[in-house]
Image (spheres, rainbow, N blue to C red):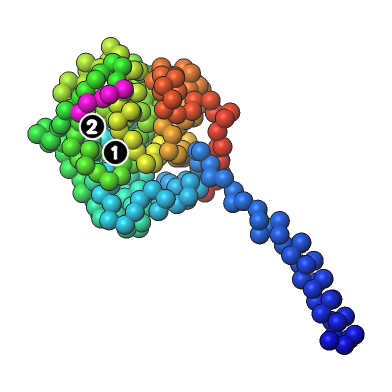
C-alpha cells in the first residue's frame, strides 16, 4: 500500500468509527418498557380499545393463532348502552375483531345475567355487536358448571365454574366501570361473578375475600375496563341517565388489581377504598399503589 492509499484507508476507517460512535446510542438503546396500564381517551370506542391494546404490545402478545378465546363482558342487566349498566357493545365488538385479526380459532361471549338473559343480551347491544364481529354468543347453560377447587381460597375452597371458562385457551375480561351498592364499585375482579354457578348471593357476606379467591384460579391474559360511560350511582343496575357520566376512556392491562385501583380514581376514590382491591394486593395478586406503575395516558 502506498502513502496515498494508506491515507485514504485511514480516513475511511476514522469516518466509519465516527459514524459508529454517533449511531451507537440509538442502536444499543433498550426498547421503551411496555406500560403496566394504558389509559386512552377518545370519541371512538373502537379506536381507543385498539390504541390501548397496541400500547400494551398489540393483540398478538395475548392471542395466538387457533386460540379459543372467551371474552367476558358484563351483560347482567336489561338496560340500553346509554344507561351504563353493561359493557359498551362497541368495546366488546372491537375485542372480538382484534382476536380474529390475531388468528383466533373461535371467540365466545357470554355472561350469567341477573335479569332475563334474552332481554339483557339484546337490550345491551352486546349480542348484535359480538355476532357481527364473528363471535359465538350463547346463554349460560346450567348443565355446564363444574366444581373447581380453590387451593388458596380464604372464603371459599371450591365453587362451580362455567366449563367454557375452564376450557378456553385465553380469557379476556371486559367489564364496565360502575357503582355498586355493596362493593362500592364493580370493576374487573367482580366481573367474574358472571361465571359462577349456584346461588351467588351466598358470597356477599365475605364478598371481598371471595372475589380474590376467584382471581387465584381465573386468570385473564388481558383486561379492558370500559369507562366510555360510567354509572356513578344506583348501581349495579342503574336506569337513570342522570347517574351516567361520559368519560370516553379505556383502561387496559394485565394486572386486575392495578386496573381496579385506577378505576377507583374515576369515581374520586382510591384502590384502598375498595376491600377486594386491598385484599388482592395483600395476597400478592397485583399492585394497588399506582405510584409504582408505569401508566401511559394518551388520546386516540
Foreground pick, 229 / 282? 282
Which residue is located at x 40 percent, y 53 percent? 60
Which residue is located at x 19 percent, y 34 percent? 162
Left or right of 201 on screen, residue 93: right
Foreground pick, 10 / 57? 10
Which residue is located at x 76 percent, y 61 percent? 21
Q: Name the quadrant of the N terminus.
A: bottom right
- In the rendered image, which residue does mark 1 sit on? 72
Left or right of 261 on screen, residue 190: left
Q: Position of residue 68 (x, y in %)?
A: 25, 49
Which residue is located at x 41 percent, y 19 percent? 279
Q: Which image quarter: residue 127?
A: top left
Task: Judge whether residue 149 is colored magenta.
Answer: yes
- In the rendered image, which residue does mark 2 sit on? 195
Question: How far is disc 1 from disc 2 in space, using C-alphas?
Answer: 9 Å
Q: How many labels does the image show?
A: 2
Q: Position of residue 177 (x, y in %)?
A: 40, 30
Secondary structure category for the residue under label 2: helix
**Residue range (magenta):** 148-152
Task: Judge whether residue 223 is colored magenta.
Answer: no
Q: Which image quarter: residue 19?
A: bottom right
Q: Can residue 97 be seen in this view?
A: no
114 over 12 or under it: above or below = above
CB-based contact (under 8 Å), mark 1 and mark 2? yes
Q: Position of residue 73 (x, y in %)?
A: 30, 38
Q: Can residue 54 be seen in this view?
A: yes
Amino acid at each position: 500500500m502506498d502513502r496515498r492509499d494508506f491515507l485514504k484507508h485511514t480516513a475511511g476507517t476514522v469516518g466509519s468509527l465516527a459514524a459508529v460512535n454517533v449511531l451507537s446510542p440509538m442502536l444499543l438503546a433498550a426498547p421503551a418498557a411496555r406500560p403496566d396500564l394504558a389509559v386512552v381517551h377518545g370519541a371512538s370506542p373502537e379506536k381507543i380499545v385498539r390504541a390501548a391494546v397496541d400500547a400494551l404490545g398489540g393483540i398478538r402478545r395475548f392471542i395466538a393463532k387457533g386460540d379459543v378465546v372467551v371474552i367476558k363482558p358484563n351483560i347482567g342487566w336489561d338496560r340500553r348502552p346509554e344507561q351504563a349498566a353493561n359493557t359498551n357493545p362497541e368495546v366488546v365488538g372491537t375485542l372480538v375483531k382484534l382476536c380474529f385479526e390475531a388468528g383466533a380459532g373461535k371467540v365466545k361471549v357470554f355472561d350469567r345475567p341477573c335479569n332475563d338473559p334474552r332481554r339483557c343480551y339484546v337490550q345491551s347491544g352486546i349480542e348484535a355487536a359480538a355476532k357481527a364481529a364473528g363471535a359465538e354468543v350463547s346463554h349460560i347453560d346450567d348443565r355446564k358448571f363444574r366444581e373447581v377447587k380453590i387451593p388458596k381460597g380464604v372464603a371459599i375452597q371450591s365453587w362451580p365454574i362455567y366449563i367454557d371458562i375452564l376450557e378456553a385457551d385465553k380469557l379476556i375480561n371486559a367489564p364496565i366501570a360502575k357503582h355498586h351498592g355493596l362493593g362500592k364499585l364493580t370493576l374487573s375482579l367482580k366481573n367474574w361473578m358472571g361465571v359462577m354457578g349456584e346461588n351467588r348471593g351466598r358470597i356477599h357476606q365475605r364478598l371481598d375475600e371471595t372475589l380474590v379467591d376467584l382471581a387465584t384460579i381465573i386468570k385473564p391474559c388481558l383486561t379492558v375496563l370500559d369507562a366510555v360511560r360510567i354509572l356513578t350511582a344506583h348501581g349495579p343496575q342503574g336506569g337513570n341517565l342522570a347517574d351516567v357520566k361520559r368519560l370516553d376512556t379505556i383502561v387496559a392491562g394485565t394486572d386486575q388489581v392495578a386496573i381496579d385501583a385506577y378505576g377507583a380514581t374515576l369515581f374520586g376514590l382510591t384502590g384502598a377504598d375498595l376491600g377486594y382491591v386491598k385484599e388482592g394486593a395483600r395476597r400478592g395478586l397485583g399492585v394497588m399503589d399506582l405510584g409504582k406503575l408505569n401508566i401511559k395516558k394518551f388520546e386516540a
